[in-house]
Image (tube, grey):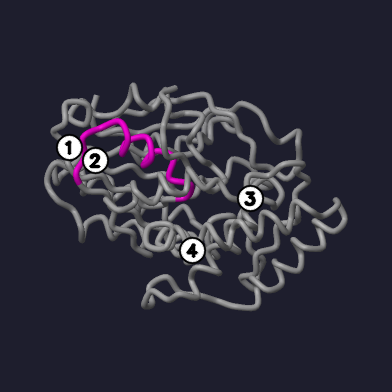
Amino acid sequence: MKNLKAKPFLKWAGGKSQLLPFFEQLYPLELKTGEIKNYYEPFLGSGAVFFWVAQNYDVDNFYLYDLNDDLIIAYMVVQKDVSRLIEVLQYYDASYRRLGDFERKEFFYNERVIYNSKRFKADSLYSEEWIKRAASFIFLNRTCYNGLYRLNSKGEFNTPAGEYRNPEICNRDNLLAVSELLKRAIIKRADFTAVLEDLKSSAFIYFDPPYRPISKTSNFKSYYNNDFSDKDQEKLADLFKELDRCGARVMLSNSDPKNIDPHDDFFDKLYGDFNILRVCAKRSINSKKEGRGYINEIVVMNYS
């Protein structure tokens, strides 16, 4: 893998860091030749693909979307106020590291209570309060169990504390590099349909939606406080087809239901007119260790 100066600053379920070298073989030729000038990524998450594309290809404009308010707030604060964010994160880092194991958990759960006591909307006007909110979000993300963002029925973050000896709470150099990269991006709280509103010519869109569950126990509410149903998957497929008709290059990742049921043709039918590959990926986000391991995922492309 190439050495990237900026890398994801958040852990995120379904992050694509492990697949980046393989994805590089799948990107459209127009991206590699410099013809693609506009990159779009709904379902931003950790942004691993964005970071790779932005640092390896000659793209002018980046459009990044997500429906998770706190995720978007974190990205916008890194973009606009990274120095002050680093100051707050360094306080979290110093406070956390001087504690013993029991006190660390107590610190985590106290912070989680404070975090859940407030709600912020990323589509409101930018506020200095967002800096503390972003720092709290990043701290909880870096110290919670397995980096899992999970909400209960009340919309409260309820992932338990993780057990880490040396968690990376504040990587100053990386945050500065990420901030510099994000200066080239438009960041919005929006769903995947916003791509059409912003679509320009010479476009490449990468979709990494909440994966269709491959088992009854794999459906974590880990993205935002909504289920992403089969009807949503179908709506996304309709958008994929519309973008294809517009002449954009489009790539999509999802789970492969054939891991459990060889006769489940859900995605094969949805994307039957396009190029579908099955790739092996390590699944690390699961409540049980035996539920982790290597499984197939699908990658859909409207180009060959």
Give the amino acid at mark 1.
Ile
Q: Which residue is mark 4?
A: 84
Q: Position of residue 296 (x, y in %)?
A: 53, 28
Where 63 sits versus 153, above or below?
A: above
Q: Nearer the viewer, residue 39 or 102?
A: 102
Q: Is residue 99 located in the magenta-colored stretch of the structure?
A: no
Say which label, 3 or 1, has the lower sequence index: 1
Residue 231 image offset from top left, x and y in percent: 42, 56
The amino acid sitting under disc 3 is Arg
Residue 214: x %, y % from top left: 59, 40
Q: CA distance from mark 2 to mark 1?
A: 7 Å
For the residues marked 2 and 3, what is the alpha-carbon distance in whole angstroms? Answer: 31 Å
Q: Check contact, mark 2 vs mark 1: CB within 8 A.
A: yes
Residue 144 percent across, percent down from the top left = 69, 52
Picture disc at residue 204:
2
**Pointer 2 local density, CA inside 10 Å: few below 14, some 14–19, many at least 20:** many
Q: CA distance from mark 3 to mark 4?
A: 18 Å
The residues bearing labels 4 and 1 have C-alpha atoms spaced at a distance of 35 Å
